[in-house]
Amino acid sequence: MTDSWLRLDHAGMRWRVRPDAEARVREREWRRPASGGAGLRIVQSWGSRVSAVWEGAAADGGDLFVKWYGLRHFGEALRFVVTPSRPAAEWRMNRALAAAGIPVVECLALGERWAGGLWRGGVLILKAVTPPLTLSAFLRTAPEAEARRAVELAADLVVRFHAQGFCHHDLHGDNLLVQRHDGQLDRLLLTDLHEGTRHRSLSRGRWVGDLARLNAYTPAGGHLRLRFWRRYAAGRGWTRAQDHDWIRTIDRETRALWARHFKKRGTSIELY
């Protein structure tokens, strides 16, 4: 994957674009769509963000996945002057992970709109994963052998991620995409990276937080969870004697996440 990026101004936005995506960026005006059409199929519209599939727009004839970001509140217009915006943060983390050899959804372009020195919105363009399938959705219906393989791939990916000092901060089964090759489970890709951080040494609290979120929000039976923990522990070089302590800590954090979810939304999401 090349890491060369072009800088250009188009449609009132400042862009960083991979060379093979420049023509596509210049095709559109990049206003936030209110509905589909013109090759776009909206898949999510929530608050200030819209996500859509741009069908057949990739250089290889595949689809692109486009996210439009707006201001959630005016404070963001000021905050993003001194800190990266949500799309810029995802773009940066995507590049850092790709450079570290960690599989991510391929990012092709970042556009940001500024007015009067303030951030007003942004667009992130990624290569779509086709067919779109999250780890959570996959585990709900996968045959046992494929579910075990997916859990092992997830553990190996998170080990690599943590070993290089990365923390996702929103790691769960819907932010891991399943990629197939010739109909077979090939690998998992990390996505939704705007909260991600990198550290010289990843603290216990950070990796426990990642694992607790993954445990809390990803559907899997107890045997698959145990398979994940043991694979992860082996990848970190831990002994079986350490299992009880850290698994108990993650279970405690998981239950705290469930309790906070119930208090906030009034619904239970307990998975075991």
Image: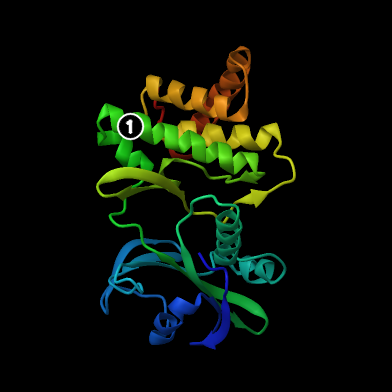
Q: Quadrant of residue 145?
A: top left
Q: Looking at the picture, how far across and down is residue 196, in whole percent?
A: 60, 51
- Packing grade of label 1 (10 A; few <14, some 14-19, many >=20) is some
Residue 42 versus residue 221 in the image, above or below? below
Q: In this view, does 6 lie to the left or right of 150?
A: right
Residue 215 versus residue 132 in the image, above or below? above
In the picture as drawn, the residue positioned furthest to the right comes out as 200
Looking at the image, which is closer to me, 267 or 248? 248
Q: Looking at the picture, how far across and down is residue 148, in whole percent?
A: 36, 29
Asked whether residue 267 is in view, the answer is no
Instruction: Give the residue at x 55% y 52%.
Output: 101
Q: In this view, does 53 lie to the left or right of 74?
A: left
Mark count:
1
Instruction: Give the residue at x 68% y 66%.
Output: 79
Residue 156 versus residue 26 in the image, above or below? above
Label 1 belongs to which residue?
Answer: 147
Looking at the image, which is closer to me, 253 or 96? 96
- Report the quarter where the C terminus lies: top left
Instruction: Give the residue at x 40% y 45%.
Output: 187
Amino acid type at circle 1 is Ala
Scheme of colours in the image: rainbow
Q: Quadrant of residue 71?
A: bottom right
Instruction: Identify the secondary structure beneath mark 1.
Output: helix
Asked whether residue 231 is in view, the answer is yes
In the picture as drawn, the residue positioned furthest to the top comes out as 241
Q: Looking at the picture, how far across and down is residue 21, in whole percent?
A: 44, 77
Q: Looking at the picture, how far across and down is residue 5, in whole percent?
A: 57, 75
